[in-house]
Image (cartoon, helix red, strand yellow):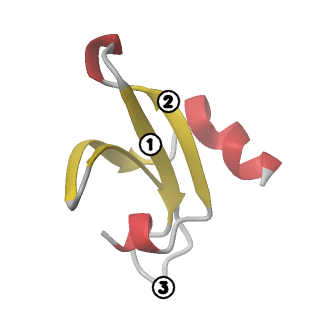
Amino acid sequence: MHAIRASVVQVSVPGRDGHGDAMLFIGHPHPQADRWLEVIAEIRPPRGVLIFHAMELTDKFRHYLQEN
């Protein structure tokens, strides 16, 4: 959850199976980390979040970090 709360990138991306929108978050797994995580989640108001993708940052999304 730290990667979401302290993310430096938040971008709207297509949701699972192309249905709806999801959010891409790029952040560190904890404050002392040097590596980056990519987390994709559907935000479900009022308080729900469905995380369906979380892994070390890949080249597919690295350009968002470099643009920021």
> Which is nearer the eye, 43 or 57?
43
Residue 5, percent across and down? 42, 72
Q: Secondary structure at mark 3?
A: loop
Mark 3–mark 2 CB contact (< 8 Å): no
Residue 45, percent across and down? 25, 52
> Which is nearer the eye, 7 or 45?
45
CA–CA distance in space, label 3 to label 2: 25 Å
Q: Secondary structure at mark 2?
A: strand
Q: Earlier in the sequence, mark 1 or mark 3?
A: 1
Front tag of 1 and 3:
1
> Which is nearer the eye, 41 or 46?
46
The residue at the point 53 percent across, 55 percent down is 26
The residue wearing badge 1 is 23
Mark 2–mark 1 CB contact (< 8 Å): yes
CA–CA distance in space, label 2 to label 1: 6 Å
The residue wearing badge 3 is 31
The amino acid type of the residue labelled 3 equals Pro
The residue at the point 27 percent across, 13 percent down is 17
Q: Secondary structure at mark 1?
A: strand
Residue 58, compared with residue 45, is above or below; it is above
Binning the other alpha carbons within 10 Å of mark 1 as few (below 14), some (14 to 19) or many (20 upward) gives some
